[in-house]
Amino acid sequence: MSNNNLITEKNNFVELEFIGRVKDGEVFDTNINEEAKKIGLEIENKPFIVCIGQKMVIEGLDNALEDKEVNKKYSIELQPEEAFGERNPSLIKLMPIKLFKEKNMNVYPGLTLSFDNMIAKVISVSGGRVLVDFNNPVAGKVVIYEFTIKRKIEEVNEKINAIIDYFLRNKFEFEIKNDEKKAVIMCEKMFESVIQMLNNQFKDILGLEMVVSEKKEETEEKKAENKSENIKN
């Protein structure tokens, strides 16, 4: 194996292990099981695969993944502007407590919750008002990332699976048609616009066009027919 195969570059797909910690502080994120357990973080037990330079991790870490050796441990220090940004005062909002009571939520200072797909932290509760901070908990802080690139991904099937898993949080069957330079993904029509956006992003990288072949729901008659066939077999 040539040394070039052990050095990363932009648009490589790589399997990444990392630990993110606040400088002089605690770990706030990791995809390593043993470390996740220490901070009470539940993670999926599967490889974390990203494409370098495609904003699948924060900017500073993304940039740092280039020109690195496989299976070598690195550590980088990132300022807020290349990590989670500066704190934004406009993201601290005063909200009526009834919004939380309607959802049967007992709110108290320090409570972390998911609100409108954003992570928020309750700062204070006073009378009928709740002061909530929608800033990322690590916003405005210098962070340290320790990371290791475990391997470079070469198989196109694994690359496509990684794209689907990362962006769609799903698992779809697909077929590679090399003669047409296409990857035909079997999924519901509702995903077509997203697949098209991903195709625009990754077509040149994969050397394939990602297209959707609509996955049809089985009719009750067909389900019964298949069940009957399975019993016979």
Image (cartoon, rainbow, N blue to C red):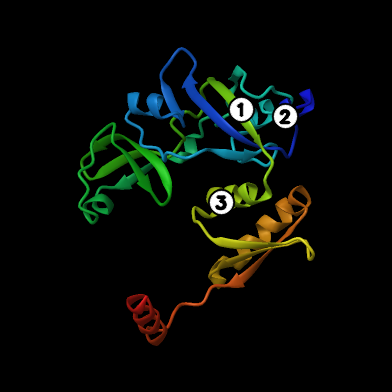
Residue type pointed to by label 3: Phe
Q: Residue at x 78, y 53 (%)?
A: 207
Q: Position of residue 164 (x, y in %)?
A: 57, 53
Q: Is residue 186 above or below residue 217?
A: above
- Disc nearest the viewer among 3 and 2: 2
Residue farthest along the top direction in this orientation: 24
Along the viewing direction, whichever of 108 and 148 lies nearer the viewer = 148
**Left or right placement of residue 65 versus residue 88 in this view:** right
Left or right of residue 180, residue 218 in this image: left
Query: Do the residues under discs 1 and 2 have CB atoms within 8 angstroms?
Result: yes
Which of the numbered marks, if any, corresponds to residue 149?
A: 1
Classify the position of the N terminus by image quarter: top right
Q: Residues within 10 Å of mark 1 (few under 14, many from 20)?
A: many
Q: Is residue 44 above or below residue 201?
A: above
Disc 1, SS: strand
In the rendered image, which residue does mark 2 sit on? 8
